[in-house]
């Protein structure tokens, strides 16, 4: 994926995650917030043809090589595109179960149980001050950890591979849940697409 970036369609309908995540939130999150990140990323790259064939991961992994006048825009908006494409793919109507396999075994090895991992993921999401993300990431050896990023930063500069992410920006939950981030996270547990997480974990090694 490189310039000119496009809004990736949601792989399900706006109301498909009800009642856990409401249709209006999904419509604005995808159709307005993500669209804005896509548009702003394209605008930043418009006058730099030499960067237009760079895949998004390359841009985000080499921010210090970018012209200074677009570095922040690519970091924030490119990160926004990258993070949200994953976030929406990491959800599915009713969720998809975590199967017996490499990811489940690695989670149990790291945290003792999937429930304990989820408790730690929730704690990470709650501890992000302001806007940002909680992540389950893997290093090149398949070692899992929980990671946090502020704003729209990604795990790419830390050489960590996304396995699952959780958007804790207020725009992800405020319409339905107001300030109740914990309630939003509890509901998000019901729509996790673990099959996508398993795919990402397998691809990370
Ligand atoms: Mn978001």
Image (cartoon, rainbow, N blue to C red):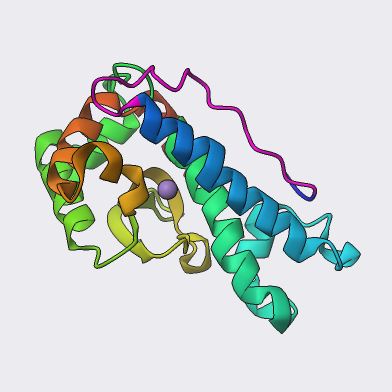
In this view, 169 is above or below 128: above
Quadrant containing the N terminus in the rendered view:
top right
Residue beneath the point at 53% across and 27% down? 10
Q: Residue at x 29, y 40 (%)?
A: 175
Left/right placement of residue 81 relative to residue 174 reads right
Visible in this render: residue 93? Answer: yes
* In the image: residue 200, left or right of residue 108: right
**Relative image position of residue 91 (x, y in whole percent):** 38, 29
Q: Which residues are magenta?
A: 4-22
Asked whether 14 falls inside the magenta stretch, the response is yes
Q: Name the side, left or right, on which 140 lies relative to 167.
A: right
Q: Residue at x 47, y 18 (%)?
A: 13
Residue 140, position in %: x, y?
46, 54
Q: Is residue 151 magenta?
A: no
In the image, farthest residue toward the right: 49
Q: Residue at x 36, y 48 (%)?
A: 171
Q: Quadrant of residue 106?
A: top left
Viewer-closest of 130 and 127: 130
Q: Main secondary structure of the magenta part?
A: loop
Q: How many marks?
A: 0
Seen from the viewer's position, the closer of residues 190 and 55 is 190
Q: Quadrant of residue 18?
A: top left
Residue 62, position as x, y percentages in the image: 65, 70
């Amino acid at each position: 994926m490189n310039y000119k970036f496009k809004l990736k369609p949601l792989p399900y309908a706006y109301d498909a995650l009800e009642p856990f995540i409401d249709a209006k939130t999904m419509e604005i999150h995808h159709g307005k917030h993500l669209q804005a990140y896509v548009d702003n990323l394209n605008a930043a790259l418009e006058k730099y043809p030499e960067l237009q064939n760079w895949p998004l991961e390359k841009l985000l992994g080499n921010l210090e090589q970018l012209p200074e006048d677009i570095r922040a825009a690519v970091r924030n908006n490119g990160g926004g595109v990258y993070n949200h494409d994953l976030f929406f793919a990491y959800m599915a109507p009713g969720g998809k179960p975590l199967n017996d396999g490499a990811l489940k075994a690695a989670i149990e090895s790291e945290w003792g149980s999937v429930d304990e991992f989820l408790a730690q993921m929730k704690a990470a999401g709650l501890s992000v001050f302001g806007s940002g993300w909680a992540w389950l990431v893997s290093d090149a050896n398949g070692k899992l950890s929980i990671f946090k990023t502020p704003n729209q930063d990604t795990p790419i500069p830390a050489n960590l591979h996304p396995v699952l992410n959780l958007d804790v920006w207020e725009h992800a939950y405020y319409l339905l849940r107001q300030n109740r981030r914990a309630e939003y996270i509890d509901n998000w547990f019901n729509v996790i697409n673990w099959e996508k997480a398993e795919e990402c974990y397998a691809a990370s090694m």
